[in-house]
Image (spheres, grey):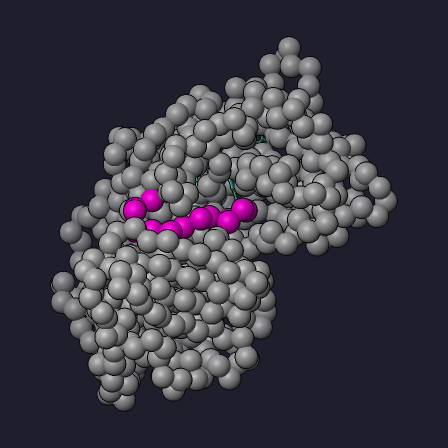
Amino acid sequence: MLNVPSQSFPAPRSQQRVASGGRSKVPLKQGRSLMDWIRLTKSGKDLTGLKGRLIEVTEEELKKHNKKDDCWICIRGFVYNVSPYMEYHPGGEDELMRAAGSDGTELFDQVHRWVNYESMLKECLVGRMAIKPAVLKDYREEEKKVLNGMLPKSQVTDTLAKEGPSYPSYDWFQTNSLVTIAIYTKQKDINLDSIIVDHQDDSFRAETIIKDCLYLIHIGLSHEVQEDFSVRVVESVGKIEIVLKKKENTSWDFLGHPLENHNSLIPRKDTEDPYMKDSYIRKNINQRRETFIFTFNPDVVGLYYRKCQLISKENVTHDTRLFCLMLPPSTHLQVPIGQHVYLKLPITGTEIVKPYTPVSGSLLSEFKEPVLPNNKYIYFLIKIYHTGLFTPELDRLQIGDFVSVSSPEGNFKISKFQELEDLFLLAAGTGFTPMVKILNYALTDIPSLRKVKLMFFNKTEDDIIWRSQLEKLAFKDKRLDVEFVLSAPISEWNGKQGHISPALLSEFLKRNLDKSKVLVCICGPVPFTEQGVRLLQDLNFSKNEIHSFTA
Ligand code: FAD
Ligand code: NAD
């Protein structure tokens, strides 16, 4: 009998079937892929049933549209008719129906904060939620206020300050030529990775990562400043200073006016802290409703994107390339070890985003980074799937073209390396990407480290990323062992073969000493990672000793 491939998407054994993070994806009917949805939205068909009209939707009206064939959902103050999208939704109809006839913002943020729904669902837009008069008054009052150093206590911080003494704050001061914005995080474990600054046109944004939240400063500056600025961190007191250069040496009476969500603490999606999930998210969503109804700006609570320029593209294997992107001059962004960002490109008129894990430009220290201040370059190792949606488009970019890059996300904590003695890395295919910075960091910055062992799973020898660099590094640094395992080798291959298995792991994962401090990091296709984690647990590695990379 012929083995006919399944027509459903994701294909039955595809990594796409289970979304990262374990959320199950449902099989979609033929003709219901993302590309098919994009085509439908471009077809000119009336997807809302309102013939292009936008309406104001009251809560009562929203509640009425709660059936599969008549399903409206509100996301951040905007109402969408998602009925035509049901069959195209990778999470399935039931997931969408959980928010039918109601505000789905919280649900959406839990699952898809990075998805560009405004673009995906723009043809399904019914209109805005009707404005509540009481809220309007509050917001306008806020808008009128100008910043003169710290906001008065009563404005934003008061409610949050009640949550504990460690609520961050900011202040500013000036000299003839400089303006310094000081952020008091009240945390000691901050560094240059903890702060992201973007200054574009009239908007100055500084996102500080404080534990499981982002503290956002978002200001329209009162005067012009130069493009470049410097960022300093005083770790001992948890202070960050952003030093801006004035365009004209005049004295500023005030710093500027507050923009959306200025001076607020926003929970990060990848928080591991249940307290943060339960109380802060709810509170912030209430807060958001008040703001969003009036000034919708998805970038403020969603991930913020900035346009980066493609500087170089280099073949690493037959299908994997090293992309180098340059941040805008007015951005400070360093992606922390173990975290990923989202890349965004318009594809046939719809903005598509996919996650990628930045790497260093090389594993070897003799590699010379181009000389630019403030880590202006971000490198990615990206495998091009010729039948994929995003990577062929990325591959078509010319040097000098732009791609949008989000702020980082991820729950890997560098504190996992404290006092670490044995580090095991299990990587499959491009699941090698988070291991790159981990390897660089482990071999240079963990004094307690005795051994690092990488087991790298690939289909064939030609698929191995940076094989010769890995071999050179292992030769140079005796603490590193690298083992390649191939699942589809040619007959001459005399190394290890097969898929991840108890036999392979039990032999590989030997602790140096019985009580040594160990960490095992694992990353690859979802079935690989899930199987690996189960095997590690069977081998008695504790939860704290395992870190699996997912989105
Ligand atoms: P997709 O369109 O997702 O296609 C992928 C595969 O599915 C292709 O083989 C395609 O043929 C198949 N497929 C597509 N449509 C169908 C269909 N209708 N039926 C059957 N099969 C189909 N990747 C990297 O290369 N580097 C990284 O650093 C990296 N970091 C990541 C970090 C995280 C946190 C996560 C979750 C993923 C990361 N990825 C990384 C993977 C990346 O996000 C994308 O999934 C990958 O680039 C594929 O995207 P694509 O749109 O080109 O392919
Ligand atoms: P691939 O298809 O070339 O496979 C590489 C190896 O993975 C195979 O040789 C095999 O040993 C193993 N493998 C593949 N499918 C398996 C299965 N069903 N069960 C057990 N083992 C299996 O890999 P690729 O195309 O490079 O894909 C890499 C994957 O890693 C992608 O799914 C990507 O999304 C994921 N990734 C995740 C992150 C992250 O979460 N942070 C980062 C980078 C890449």
How many discs appear?
0
**Is 101 rendered above or below residue 361?**
below
Res. 390 image quadrant: top left
Residue occupying the far right of the picture: 514
* Residue pictured at 14% horizontal, 63% vertical: 52
Is residue 22 something one can see in this rendering?
A: no
Query: Where 250 sits versus 304, above or below?
Result: below
Magenta-span inclusion, residue 446: no
Residue range corresponding to the magenta coloring:
327-339
Q: Decide if residue 137 is in sight here.
A: yes
Q: Residue at x 31, y 35 (%)?
A: 310
Would you say 335 lies left or right of 485 here? left
Q: Is residue 335 rendered magenta in the image?
A: yes
Q: Residue furthest top?
A: 492
**Percent x, y of residue 323:** 39, 33
| Along the line of sight, the residue nearer the viewer: 456 or 130 | 456
Q: Residue at x 30, y 50 (%)?
A: 228
In the rendered view, does 376 fall on the left or right side of 467? Answer: left
Q: Is residue 535 left or right of residue 304?
A: right
Q: Where 275 falls versus 111 (above or below)?
A: below
Residue 433 coordinates in the image, percent (x, y): 52, 37
Viewer-proximal residue, 246 or 267? 246
Q: Quadrant of residue 438?
A: top right
